Image (spheres, helix red, strand yellow):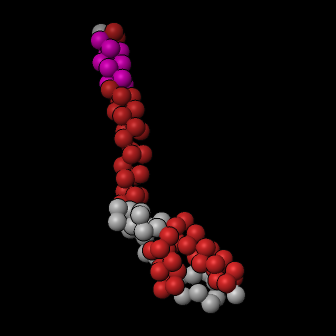
Amino acid sequence: MKHKIAAVFSDKLHDQEEDLCCKERVRPMKKKQQHQQKRLEQPEPFTPAVTRAMVRQHAFELFRDKLPDHPLTIEDWVLAEKDLVNSMETMA
């Protein structure tokens, strides 16, 4: 009787381990897909004399090949603002 109980318990434990293993593999992919699909609003610029419209226009010029397929990330917005400020400083 002990062997039957141990065998059943072992089978259930093995099934749970497989479920956990499969969930661990699937879960990061779902989060990654949700993260990519989440649309990010444009953040406020950090630089005092720069407006959101100026950064948006510069971002559209910088990332025109990326925009039709993918929304801009926070890193893209920050890079666009830094590039805009850098170009404004060199022109002045």
* Majority secondary structure of magenta residues: helix
Q: Position of residue 41 (x, y in %)?
A: 43, 75
Position above or below: 90 against 37: below
Q: Quadrant of residue 18?
A: top left
Residue at image location 35% in from the left, 15% down from the top: 6
Q: Position of residue 31 (x, y in %)?
A: 40, 52
Q: Quadrant of residue 86?
A: bottom right
In the displayed image of the protein, which residue is found farthest to the bottom?
49
Residue at image location 42% in from the left, 45% down from the top: 28
Quarter of the C terminus within the rendering:
bottom right
Q: Nearer the viewer, residue 49 or 8?
A: 49
Quarter of the N terminus within the rendering:
top left
Q: Position of residue 36 (x, y in %)?
A: 40, 58
Q: Nearer the viewer, residue 4 or 75?
A: 75
Q: Nearer the viewer, residue 70 or 14?
A: 70
User: In screen coordinates, is 33 left or right of 86?
Assistant: left
Position above or below: 69 against 57: above
Position above or below: 18 against 43: above
Residue at image location 51% in from the left, 77% down from the top: 58
Q: Is residue 45 visible?
A: yes
Q: Is residue 9 visible?
A: no
User: In screen coordinates, is 7 left or right of 43?
Assistant: left
Residue at image location 37% in from the left, 25% down from the top: 13
Q: Which residues are magenta?
A: 4-14
Position above or below: 25 against 6: below
